[in-house]
Image (cartoon, helix red, strand yellow):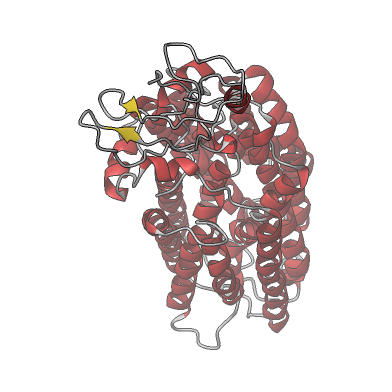
Amino acid sequence: MWAPAFFTLGNRTRALRGFPVFPRVAPGPGRARRPAPLRAAPSRPGSRPPRGGGRPGDNTESVQPCAMAVSPEGIPAPPVDTPPPPPEAHTLEPGSDSGAGRLSFCTKVCYGIGGVPNQVASSAIAFYLQLFLLDVAQIPAAQVSLVLFGGKVSGAAADPLAGFFINRSRRTGSGRLMPWVLGCTPFIALASFFLWFLPPFTSLRGLWYTALYCLFQALATFFQVPYTALTMLLTPSPRERDSATVYRMTLEMAGTLMGATVHGLIVSGAHGSHRCKETALPGQVAISPNATRLYSIAATVVAVTYPVCSSLLCLGVKERPDASARASGQGLSFLAGLRLTVRHPPYLKLVISFLFISAAVQVEQCYLVLFCAHASRLHDHVQSLVITILVSAVLSTPMWEWVLQRFGKRMSAFGIFGMVPFAILLAAVPTAPVAYVVAFVSGVSIAVSLLLPWSMLPDVVDEFQLQHQHGPGLETIFYSSYVFFTKLSGAGALGISTLSLDFAGYKPGACKQAEQVVVTLKVLIGAMPTCMILIGLCILLVGPTPKVPRRNSSRSLGRRTSYSLA
């Protein structure tokens, strides 16, 4: 009886020549089992007897990949199958640059296109919704504050719900995340259109726009959360994920530019200095039918981008299944995972710092148009200033990606500080040359403020997974909870700031506002964003920043499990 050994390709040759053959035997649990007796193969005339005292012809005739073990009593045990090796495509080390984890240019572009429609709609809302509600729909400022606050809170509340339902969803033929994106597309397109529709009644317009904005924000959340979490399932390579994030952010910046530009060019006829010159009364101006028609056309253009871009995303991006999800079993529940994520110090620092920074950016975007229309003589420069901000943001995104790779993410955070002195300068000297310089620098700072958190968040997920070694399903929790907190901070900032306009005496639809309103707009455009940016940067730059896990530290996990959703 021969000692157990691994089966090799040389066994066939050894059997033909009369030498012993070594079968492949899978060891049982606890101790190795003896192999079954081997049948003798017919020996050729004149062949030598095998070594070890065996008789001629005791060689194995054929050996199967699965061997049958024998118990000590001589009773054959059931065959033991050796599990197949895991697929090579999912065993990449974090930080490795294997060719199996590389993404093609077409995949990155199609992935970035998927985020364009939400950015087109969000850009139009950020720059023009407040102006539309105050001067076209002529809703009181207190009700506008309720609309903005309720919509942001609705979107924030939908984030953990989206993470919960996506976390419990099963994988389909198109993946686990892609069906959510495609299912939300027709409904969010309709909601974005009716958000700019002027209803015939006047008494309940505040309630109408509150309900529609809440619906739009909730649907946008169920669209955006699986789309952003898809980054973790594109490839296991952190470098390729960062590259895909850059493509996504660049195309989302382009979508932001397209939304503000196209929407602004269409509705520019509804605003401007000529609107007040056409009336002899300095007070409230009647609603123009031309303004409602222009906003309806702009809403149609924005709504069409959803089905077009979602189709390109589905055709060009394939969600990779994670084999480690089957090996590791069911992950943590949503509530248990949420409790773990909010206790992770790097994640807490990232979230708290960008609570202030993202709120500052939202306030800057929201009140720029109102500031130019009512606190300065920049009525005719509104569209040009918005385009300057967005063009500089789009063009500076590749530069910030180079800075991230060359100098690190901590050094890139100092680029957000560039917005601070220029925001104060615009509030103090509201002239056209100063406004264009401030718009260009603000666009550069906004680009890094949007790119940095989405580049740091995958590193936080990697670090958390290496420390805790939990099963799959935590990526959606990280992404949804981060968006939840940032939206909640934006809701508070926009709600309180719009309510301050009502306290200052803002008159909807009026051509000239009171001096208290002008001072309030200067504070909202200068002092308020400055304070929030400084607080956020101080929190972000204190202590170590999360780093990409090294190859040697990631081996303790055995196989990669942080890229799957349970």
Q: How many marks?
A: 0
Please say if 488 is above or below 556: below
539 or 14: nearer the eye?
Answer: 14
Q: Could you tell me which residue is drawn at 41 percent across and 26 percent down?
A: 557
In the displayed structure image, the side of residue 385 where residue 60 appears, left or right: left
Quadrant position of residue 513: bottom right
Tell me the quadrant of the picture where the N terminus can be found. top left
Residue 52 in view in this figure? yes
Q: Position of residue 171 (x, y in %)?
A: 47, 58
Picture coordinates of residue 50 (x, y %)?
50, 15
542 is higher (above) or lower (below) than 354: above
**Residue 219 pos. (x, y %):** 49, 65
Q: Is residue 508 visible?
A: no
Q: Residue at x 54, y 27 (%)?
A: 94
Q: Given the current orientation, which residue lies at the most extreme front position? A: 45
Q: Residue furthest top?
A: 52
Q: Nearer the viewer, residue 38 or 531?
A: 38
Residue positioned most to the left: 73
**Foreground residue, 151 or 465?**
465
549 with respect to 89 (left or right): left
Query: Residue 550: image x %, image y %?
Result: 52, 18
Q: In terms of depth relative to the viewer, which is nearer, 175 or 291? A: 175
